[in-house]
Image (tube, rainbow, N blue to C red):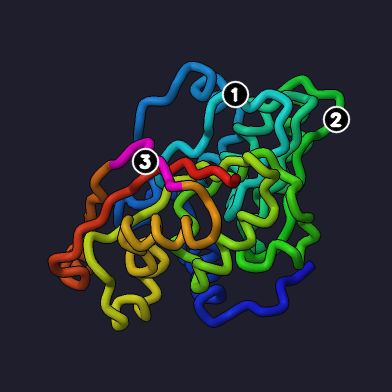
Amino acid sequence: MDPIYKTDKHEEVSEYYGSTLEKSDDLKTNACCTVKSYPENIRKGLTLIHDEVLEKYYGCGLTIPEELEGMRVLDLGSGSGRDCYLVSYLVGELGSVVGVDMTDEQLDVAQRHIAYHTKKFGYASSNIEFRKGLIEQLDEVGLEDNSFDVAISNCVINLCPDKPAALNEIFRVLKPGGQFYFSDVYSDQPVPEHLVNDPVLYGECLSGALSASNFIQMATDTGFRTPKEIERSVITIRNDEVIRKVGDLKFHSITYSVFKD
């Protein structure tokens, strides 16, 4: 089902991730491709994922909490499906995964490898599905209240034009006691409006960033418990033009865990 309230900003981001970028090496910063050391179960799962899915991965951290066996998990902004397939492996055949993304090109990559991963994981049937939609409008893709144990998101919330609406929808679909475990980019100060309107800086996950304090306030206003910081790393920019544009703004990739009461 096509989303019905897609904004110009959504269209910009879809174009950036659907056609401007062809692989993770095309990014101008490490905001969406942080390299880190993964636990053994994650490393094993990654070896089973199709090369095309890995090549078009644009995440900014590890958004996989521990103890996922048998759980129902929602991946927001699932892109080519890397994290979805990793979670599909970790939840086992009794668990399930739903990935939501708004970009046709990314969804096409994810969907065409469902059978491959079902066989690779040794499952009798697939435990994963992908749906087209916006994080701010999860009701439009048929996601019901209190229906997921865990929601994850990897460098995507900063790309949502309406972040309060996104958080409200995430809160709605999580079960009581459910966890939102996600990585995103944060700025050390408010981002000027002219940078927010720059499609490259926005697509690179920089100019749509909140400050950490603003996010924490927004999350608690939504009804989540106070977010717990899991990990933080500095964003490095490797493009001279982007460096010039952002000036003295500093950015971090931060992983948070927040729970719904």
The residue stretch that appears in magenta? 226-232
Q: Are marks 2 and 1 in contact (CB under 8 Å)?
A: no
The residue at 68%/32% (across/down) is: 88
Location of mark 1 (residue): 67
In terms of depth relative to the viewer, which is nearer, 148 or 161? Answer: 148
In the figure, is residue 213 to the left or right of 11?
Answer: left
Regarding mark 3 in the picture, which secondary structure is present there? strand
Q: Could you say where residue 15 lies in the image, as x and y percent from the top left? A: 53, 70
What is the x, y in percent for residue 259?
Answer: 54, 43
Element type where label 2 sits in the image: loop
Q: Amino acid at mark 1?
A: Glu
Q: Earlier in the sequence, mark 2 or mark 1?
A: 1
The Cα–Cα distance between marks 2 and 3, rounded to whole angstroms, is 36 Å
- Which amino acid type corresponds to the residue marked 3 in the rendered image? Glu
- Mark 2: few/some/many CA within 10 Å (<14, 14-19, 20+): few
The residue where tag 3 is placed is 229
- Quickly name the residue at label 2: 125
Q: In the image, is residue 151 above or below residue 195?
A: above
- Whether residue 52 is visible, yes or no, is no
Find the distance from the CA under tag 3 to the CA under tag 1: 18 Å
Q: Which of the 4 image quarters holds residue 207? A: bottom left
Question: Which quadrant, please, contains the C terminus?
Answer: top right
Say above or below: 206 vs 245.
above
